[in-house]
């Protein structure tokens, strides 16, 4: 009896142990799945955070760009209005009040024209350079070109151009001219370095073979037909161009005409042509150097470059 009971209890224990292992395995599987889900959720959250962070950064960048453009427009408007008041003569009471309001010192705009000057009217004000003098206090110098009409007694109206520097302090949307307007020119300078200038040169491609007179005549006809079509109808001209979308329309007042060919060579599939074109713009004409490349098989223009 005791042996049967012992064997029965042992069998029951082994059964309970087997059940426990199965449950443990199931729990392990559930735990692994849970960990994977949490890891996936974590990755998704990280991606979302990064996405919104980057999107926010781009938005801030675009907003900054828009704000910068808006600020530049306001700066231009202020400088233009101030210089217009500064040069205008005779000055109205409103003009005098604006100058007083926007200038740190009354002496900065208290000048007089010659006694025979009857009127001064500003035509245009162009800001061509800007210099930041003080980032903390928001002080800027604007270099401007001002064109104005001067009427002198017993004389015809003359057109004058003046180059100035105006120094402005900014506080939010508020402005103050803090230095007298000075007659200083700070225009862009021309590039003079020979090595740099040489790098700007255009060296047209050239074929390895020369061509006979008959071929030159055919090439001449191809270019003349293309130019005539180009002058009259951009849609049809693009049919004669190997990459149609690259051919942009001429100005409505402009036409091109072949003036002469200086060099025609060829490779296996291309004619290379250096020539001059007469460009007519309304009543003005000029001779320009052009380089053409023509696809031999398709008889279409591949390249058209002015140089």
Image (spheres, grey):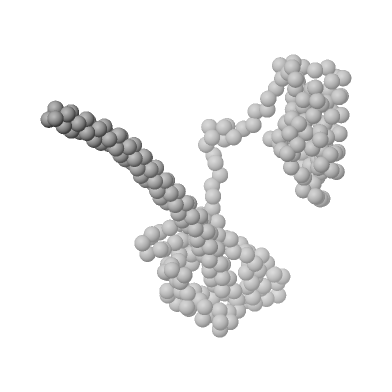
Q: Quadrant of residue 180?
A: bottom left
Q: What x and y, as percent, mark residue 36?
A: 36, 40
Looking at the image, residue 142 lies above or below residue 294: below
Which image quarter holds the N terminus? top left
Seen from the viewer's position, the closer of residues 210 and 48 is: 48
Residue 207: tell me if it is visible. yes
Q: What x and y, as percent, mark residue 81?
A: 56, 70
Seen from the viewer's position, the closer of residues 214 and 293 is: 293
What residue occupies the far bottom of the structure in this picture? 93
Seen from the viewer's position, the closer of residues 66 and 207 is: 66
Residue 43: tell me if it is visible. no
Looking at the image, residue 41 lies above or below residue 223: below
What residue occupies the far front of the structure in this picture? 1
What number of labels is visible?
Answer: 0
Seen from the viewer's position, the closer of residues 46 and 287 is: 46
Name which residue lies at 43% across and 49% down.
Answer: 48
Name which residue lies at 61% across and 62% down.
Answer: 161
Name which residue lies at 57% across and 35% down.
Answer: 197
Q: What x and y, as percent, mark residue 198?
A: 57, 32
Which image quarter holds the C terminus? top right
Name which residue lies at 60% across and 79% down.
Answer: 90
Q: Is residue 131 left or right of residue 202?
A: left
Q: Is residue 80 left or right of residue 168?
A: right
Looking at the image, residue 298 lies above or below residue 186: above
Q: Is residue 122 left or right of residue 58?
A: right
Q: What x and y, as percent, mark residue 106?
A: 45, 77
């Amino acid at each position: 009896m005791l042996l049967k009971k012992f064997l029965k209890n042992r069998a029951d224990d082994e059964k309970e142990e087997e059940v426990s292992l199965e449950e443990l395995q199931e729990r392990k599987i559930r735990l692994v799945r849970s960990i994977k889900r949490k890891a996936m959720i974590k990755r998704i959250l990280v991606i979302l955070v990064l996405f919104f962070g980057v999107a926010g950064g781009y938005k801030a960048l675009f907003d900054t760009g828009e704000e910068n453009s808006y600020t530049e427009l306001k700066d231009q408007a202020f400088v233009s209005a101030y210089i217009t008041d500064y040069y205008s003569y005779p000055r109205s009471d409103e003009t005098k009040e604006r100058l007083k309001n926007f200038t740190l010192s009354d002496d900065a705009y208290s000048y007089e024209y010659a006694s025979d000057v009857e009127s001064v009217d500003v035509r245009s004000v162009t800001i061509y350079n800007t210099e930041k003098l003080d980032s903390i206090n928001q002080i800027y110098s604007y270099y401007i070109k001002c064109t104005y009409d001067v009427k002198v007694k017993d004389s015809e109206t003359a057109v004058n151009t003046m180059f100035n520097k105006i120094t402005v302090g900014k506080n939010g949307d508020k402005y103050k001219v803090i230095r007298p307007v000075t007659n200083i020119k700070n225009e862009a300078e021309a590039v003079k370095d020979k090595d740099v200038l040489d790098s700007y040169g255009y060296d047209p491609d050239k074929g390895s073979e020369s061509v006979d007179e008959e071929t030159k005549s055919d090439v001449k006809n191809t270019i003349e037909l293309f130019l005539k079509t180009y002058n009259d109808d951009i849609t049809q001209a693009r049919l004669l161009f190997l990459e149609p979308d690259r051919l942009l329309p001429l100005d409505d007042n402009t036409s091109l005409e072949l003036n002469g060919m200086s060099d025609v060579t060829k490779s296996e599939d291309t004619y290379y042509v250096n020539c001059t074109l007469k460009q007519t713009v309304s009543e003005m004409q000029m001779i320009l150097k052009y380089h053409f490349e023509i696809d031999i098989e398709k008889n279409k223009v591949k390249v058209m470059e002015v140089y």
